[in-house]
Amino acid sequence: MEVIKTDIEGVVIIEPRIFKDERGYFYESFSQREFEEKVCRTTFVQDNQSKSSYGVLRGLHFQKPPYSQSKLVRCIKGAVLDVAVDIRKGSPTFGKHVAVELTEENHRQFFVPRGFAHGFAVLSEEAVFLYKCDNFYCKESEGAVAWNDPELAIDWRIPAEKVLLSEKDKHNKNIRETDYLFDYNEKLY
């Protein structure tokens, strides 16, 4: 696998080595050993899958300690714009984001470390999205930042009037107003 660094330390794009022939293709989608060598030491404990239609925007979500999570995400059907936002107070990249298009054709994966809010918008008619998480989900630990916070200035590549949100995501606060932010100096792993 090739690891592509982004403008924010720790947030990386992963491109697998794909073997194609007349039968189709094969690739190793995850290797714990290689991930730890090239990205970071963590153990994924939960896999999640979602199916969504065009315009659905899920995010920007995170979990507060002690249930904070890293996520390794990919799109196995369709296309999404995936976004990681640095929500660590004191970080030199606080409030900055990385956005990457994940599709069934490019097979890319995106690693979102602890200390980041995560979200995605569906760009295709339909998308099936997979998440590997390194901590278990805990409802009481949920946190979120508004998808349309002007300070974040995220181009979701969907007209605002076409965005479909959960009822809960319609009420998320801007980054400076959210109930919780991580501390850049806090050890999260």
Image (cartoon, rainbow, N blue to C red):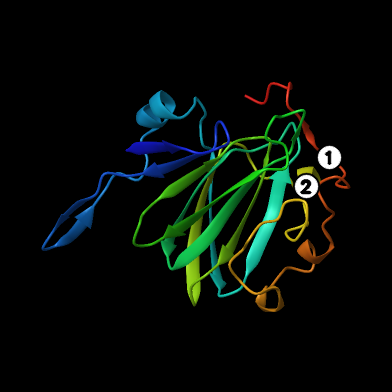
> In the image, is 36 to the left or to the right of 170?
left
Q: Position of residue 189 (x, y in %)?
A: 62, 24
* Among the two numbered marks 2 and 1 on one chain, the one whose residue lies closer to the N terminus: 2
| Number of dots carrying numbers | 2
- Residue at the far left: name it: 22
Residues at discs 2 and 1 in contact (Cβ within 8 Å): yes
Residue linked to disc 1: 180
Q: Position of residue 102 (x, y in %)?
A: 45, 57
Residue linked to disc 2: 143
Q: CA distance from mark 2 to mark 1?
A: 7 Å
Establish if 13 lies above or below 146. Answer: above
Label 1: how many residues lie within 10 Å, few (<14), some (14-19) or many (20+)?
some
Which image quadrant for residue 9?
top right
Establish if 81 lies above or below 68. Answer: below
* Secondary element type, mark 1: loop
**In the image shown, does 115 or 95 lie closer to the viewer?**
95
Mark 1 residue type? Tyr
The residue located at (48%, 57%) in the rendering is 101
Q: Position of residue 12 (x, y in %)?
A: 49, 38
